[in-house]
Image: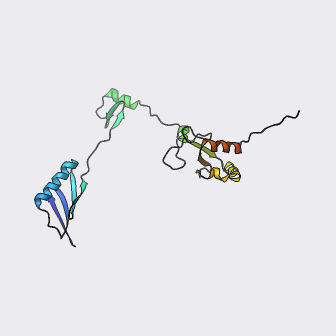
Amino acid sequence: MKQINRRITILDTEVEILVPDTIPFPSEKELNEIIADRKKKYNVPIKKITLSFDEEFVDAECIFEPVPFERIRRITGYLVGDVERFNNAKRAEVADRVSHTLSTTDKMRMRDTDADGRNDYIDTDGYTKPMDNYCKLSAADYEKIQERNKSLVANCRRTADGDYILQCSQAVKQEIDNILKPVLRHTVKK
């Protein structure tokens, strides 16, 4: 089965037509209807359309003209593209704005240490604030836990600074704390 390829311009749009030789080539009226329908459907200037015909369907692949847009920001309570049309008082207000940024500690708490796409909220003390429990283990602590119970640190991830991050339940976290900081019990002789 051979395919007939043609390139024509219809309604100020470049059209590439792919038709197998087993079906008749579409009429100019049919092509005009298809292109007018696409222009109406997308309501965006179309640069090029590739029409692929087969026995039952017509596939229309459209390439659109670039649409210019202007970046809009909220500046001192107004949605604007730029401050060009502001008066002197409003421009002074823009110049006096205070930029609010996160402190280094907050940035530290909002790292994605395990690369799962979520911030882990690692606190510098070693564990997290919300939902999941995370333990930050030094290499020595990791080795100590691995000697006692390898299954506790099975899903650990190593960070760039050589520490280990472990996502765990509250029970596992308590067990790790018991291994690292055992409670000393004293018996008193009578």
Q: Which of the 4 image quadrants contains residue 18?
A: bottom left
- On the question of residue 13 being in view, the answer is yes
Q: Which of the 4 image quadrants contains residue 34?
A: bottom left
* Residue 69 horizontal side relative to residue 125, left or right: left
* Residue 174 horizontal side relative to residue 27, left or right: right
Identify the residue at the far top of this view: 89
* Residue 153 horizontal side relative to residue 53, left or right: right
Instruction: Between residue 163 and residue 76, name the one nearer to us.
Output: 163
Q: Residue 8, position in %: x, y?
A: 15, 62
Identify the residue at the far right of this view: 190
* Residue 137 horizontal side relative to residue 81, left or right: right
**Residue at (37%, 29%) from the top-left corner?**
92
Identify the residue at the far bottom of this view: 1
Q: Residue 143, position in %: x, y?
A: 69, 52
**Residue at (48%, 48%) from the top-left corner?**
117
- On the question of residue 44 being in view, the answer is no
**Residue at (83%, 36%) from the top-left corner?**
187
Q: Which of the 4 image quadrants contains residue 73?
A: top left
Q: Residue 128, position in %: x, y?
A: 57, 40
Q: Residue 24, position in %: x, y?
A: 14, 67
